[in-house]
Image (cartoon, coloured by chain):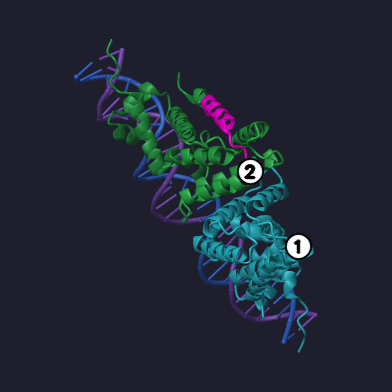
Chain colours: A green, B cyan, C blue, D purple
DNA sequence: AAATGACTATATTTGCGATTCTAGTCATAT
DNA sequence: ATATGACTAGAATCGCAAATATAGTCATTT
C-alpha cells in the first residue's frame, strides 16, 4: 500500500481561494485541480461530487472562522462583553472571504450551499438563544427583546457581508460595536461568563462541522 | 377651451398602486390607464414618456412620505430626539410601498429610477450632515462618528427595505429605535431643536421634489 | 380642447438547433 | 494503491428567426 501523497487540505485551500475570487458559481473542478497542482482525478478520489467538495470547504471555513473568533475573544481582556463578542464574531467571519460569497450570490445553481431563508432563520434563532443566555448572565441588558435584537443584527450582518461599502468594513464594525457597547452592554466588569458562553458556543459549532 | 376633466393625481395614484404590486419592472402603460379609468392617450397628454411618469410617481411618493414623517414627528412630544426622528423617518418610508420597490429590484430596465450607488452615497452624505447638525444641537452624542453611524444606518435601512423579514417590520424599527435611544440620544429633555432641524430638512426635500 | 383606443414601430421574449463547457469516468501510468 | 488527464455525456450558452408584447402615435370622437 502506498500512502496518499496529496493532502486533502491542499485541495480545500485551492477551492477556498477560487471561491473567494470567483464565487461559488464560478469555480470549476479543473481550476481547483490546477490551483492545487494535482490532476482532476484526485478530487474524485477524495470527494464523491463537486457539491460534497464545496460543502467540505464551507465546513472548514466555518471552523477556521470560529477558531479565529475564539482567539480574538480570548486575547481581549474585555472580550466577554456583548459588544466585543459581536465585533470579534463579525471580524472573524470577514476573515474568511470564501464564506462571504455565501451572502453575495443571488442564489446560484449550487442551491444546497447558499443560506436559504430557513437556514438564516435557524442561525438567527441560535443568536436569539445566545443573547438570552447572556442576559441570564447579566452581560446583556435584561430589558432588551432578544428576538428583535437578533433579527436586527442578522439584517445588518447580511447587508454588510453582501456588499463592499465605501466606508471601510472595519470602521463599520467598530461603529456598530460602539453602539452595542452603549446600548446593550451592562456595566458589569467581570465578563468572563460571557467569554465562557461564547467559547462553548463556538466550540460546539466547530465540533459539529469538523470532519472526523 | 374645455377644462381637463382627468386629474393627474388619478394617474399617479394608479401608477403608484401598480408599482407597489408589480414593481417598477412590471408596470405597463395600458395597465396604468386601465387602473386609472382613462384612455392611454391621456397619459401622454400629461407626461412625455413612461420614464417621466414614473419619475413623477417617485417624486410624489417621496413628498408624501416626507409629509408623513413631519406629521409623525410633530405629533410626538419627544419627536425631536434622534431615536424618534429615526423611527418616524423609517416608518414614513415604509408607509409608501411604491418607494420600497426602489430597493427591491435588482436594477431593472428603468435604470434612471433605481437608487444607484451614487445616489445612495449622496443620501448617506445628507444623513451624515444631518447627524452632525444634531450633534451641534446637543441632540446626538457628540463622541459618535457621524460618518460611520450614517453608513451603518443606511446599510440597515437598505436591508430592511429590501426584504420581508419574518419578525414584523414595526418590531424591527422599534427595536432599532430602542438601541438608538440607548446609544445615540443624549439625556437632553428639550429636543425641539431636533424637531425644527428635521422639519426644515424634510420641507427642503418636499419643495425640491414637488411639481410646480 | 380634451379624450379615446386602434394602430404601428420597436423592443422583448420564445423556440430551437448548433456550439461550447464542464462534471464526472476510466484506461493507463507510476 | 494512487495519481493522471484524455475522453464523454449531458448541461449550459449562443445565434438567430419567429412570435409576442408594449411604448408611443394620431385620426376620430365628445
Where is residue B28? Give x, y as percent.
64, 63
A103, A192: nearer the viewer? A192
Q: Which range of residues does the magenta coloring cover?
A: A184-205
Q: Are marks 2 and 1 in contact (CB under 8 Å)?
A: no
A89, A155: nearer the viewer? A89
Majority secondary structure of magenta residues: helix
Q: Which residue is mark 1?
A: B72
Where is residue B137? Give x, y as percent.
63, 66
Q: Is residue A77 left or right of residue A22?
A: right
**Mark carried by residue A49:** none
Q: Is residue D12 left or right of residue B103?
A: left
Examine the structure image and report whether residue B193 is included in the region drawn in magenta: no
Quadrant where the C terminus of chain A is found in the figure: top left
Q: Relative to B42, is B117 above or below? A: above
* Image quadrant in which you'd find residue B97: bottom right
The answer to whether one can see residue A80 in this image is: yes
Amino acid at each position: 500500500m502506498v500512502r496518499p501523497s496529496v493532502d486533502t487540505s491542499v485541495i480545500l485551500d485551492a477551492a477556498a481561494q477560487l471561491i473567494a475570487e470567483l464565487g461559488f458559481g464560478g469555480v470549476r473542478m479543473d481550476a481547483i485541480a490546477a490551483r492545487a497542482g494535482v490532476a482532476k482525478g484526485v478530487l474524485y478520489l477524495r470527494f464523491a461530487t463537486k457539491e460534497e467538495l464545496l460543502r467540505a470547504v464551507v465546513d472548514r471555513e466555518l471552523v477556521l472562522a470560529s477558531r479565529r473568533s475564539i482567539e480574538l475573544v480570548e486575547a481581549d481582556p474585555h472580550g466577554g462583553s456583548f459588544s466585543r463578542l459581536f465585533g470579534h464574531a463579525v471580524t472573524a467571519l470577514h476573515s474568511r472571504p470564501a464564506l462571504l460569497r455565501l451572502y453575495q450570490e443571488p442564489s446560484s445553481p449550487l442551491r444546497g450551499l447558499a443560506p436559504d431563508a430557513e437556514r438564516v432563520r435557524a442561525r438567527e434563532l441560535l443568536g436569539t438563544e445566545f443573547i438570552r443566555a447572556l442576559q441570564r448572565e447579566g452581560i446583556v441588558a435584561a430589558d432588551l427583546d432578544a428576538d428583535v435584537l437578533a433579527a436586527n443584527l442578522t439584517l445588518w450582518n447580511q447587508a454588510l457581508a453582501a456588499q463592499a461599502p465605501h466606508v471601510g468594513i472595519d470602521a463599520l464594525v467598530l461603529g456598530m460595536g460602539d453602539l452595542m457597547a452603549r446600548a446593550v452592554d451592562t456595566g458589569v466588569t467581570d465578563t468572563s461568563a460571557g467569554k465562557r458562553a461564547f467559547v462553548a458556543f463556538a466550540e460546539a459549532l466547530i465540533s459539529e462541522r469538523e470532519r472526523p
